[in-house]
Amino acid sequence: MLDDSRVGRGLDIVALIGGRRVSRSEVQEWEAERAARVCEKLDIVSPPRGLSAQRDALVARKLELGHQELERRLARELRISSRISRLMAALSRGRRRLCTIELSGSGGSAEAMPGYYKTAMETGDEAALLAASPDHFLLFEGGDGVQQVVETTGGSPFAARIFLDESDTTSVTTNADPEFPVQWVAVGRGSVDGPPAGAIRHQFRDEADGFRVRLTGEFPAFTPPHLIRAHRWHLACEFSNWIEAANR
């Protein structure tokens, strides 16, 4: 149910996914389906009506459960996804399969979004980080300064743990486009000191009448194509929500 006026207000964000223009309402319908599944997973018996209310309920439930309980509930999934990730990385031998979409919108600023995310990470504002996608479970910066993310990526049935390293990005294969002045680049690892398993290069540009964003996730080459296709919607969901939040 998309019956809340706070949802998607003002920026008219459109996604380009697999060569097709996808409206904000289509992305929100995808988000609503994922929210329903995660509500069930986290024992929210009677989810509220409306996407914004469901977002709030999911964030509240995740914060209520806390890191330790969420880790316990997801332990089996994390063990399975870790083994699969190591296998795919080994078989891929450093080769990558790209997952890329673009977002565009009128008004507002996309270049402000990475700063919004960075501030939330540094201040421990988990609610702002969790709210962007139903599939976010843990997003925080550890005492060592390394970002840790536990989420369900794309169409995977299992949550995965990713350590984002922004200090050494030499293994990133996607080149920066000089037309995008703001870059967010990081390497994903399965453990703090593990080998690179993937990477991100997200690029942002404000324009006279709006903005444009190019989002790229680099996965091991052996990642099944259907998971890549599903992850495009995950990217459209979380970054559209973060851009809207950064412009409030």
Image: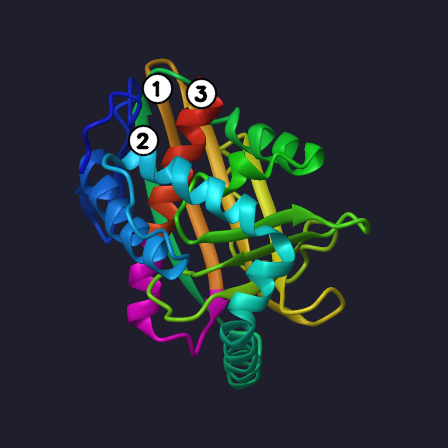
Q: Splitting the image into 4 quarters, where does residue 47 fall?
A: top left
| Contact check, label 1 and label 2, Cβ < 8 Å | yes
Q: Quadrant of the N terminus?
A: top left
Which residue sits furthest right? 144
Question: Residue drawn at (69%, 68%), measured in percent from left and top?
Answer: 191
Q: Quadrant of the C terminus?
A: top left
Distance from label 3 to label 1 (Cα)? 7 Å
Q: Is residue 205 visible?
A: yes
SS at mark 3 in the image = loop
Question: Residue drawn at (58%, 55%), measured in percent from left and top?
Answer: 149
- Relative placement, left or right, of 56 versus 80 is left
User: Which numbered disc flags the more N-terminal residue, 2 or 3?
Assistant: 2
Height in image: 215 above or below 198? above
- Under mark 2, the amino acid is Ser
> Disc 1 designates what residue?
210
Task: Give coordinates of residue 94: x percent, y percent.
Answer: 57, 75
Height in image: 222 above or below 29? below
Q: Splitting the image into 4 quarters, where does residue 206 fall?
A: top left
Q: Is residue 123 magenta?
A: no
User: Which numbered disc flags the more N-terminal residue, 1 or 2?
Assistant: 2
**Over which residues does the magenta segment extend?**
219-232
Q: Nearer the viewer, residue 221 or 163?
A: 163
> Disc 2 designates what residue?
104
Task: Give coordinates of residue 204: x percent, y percent.
Answer: 47, 33
> Disc 3 designates what residue?
109
Answer few, some or many: residues within 10 Å of disc 2's Cα (few below 14, many 20 plus, some between 14 and 19): many
Task: Give coordinates of residue 164: x percent, y percent.
Answer: 64, 55
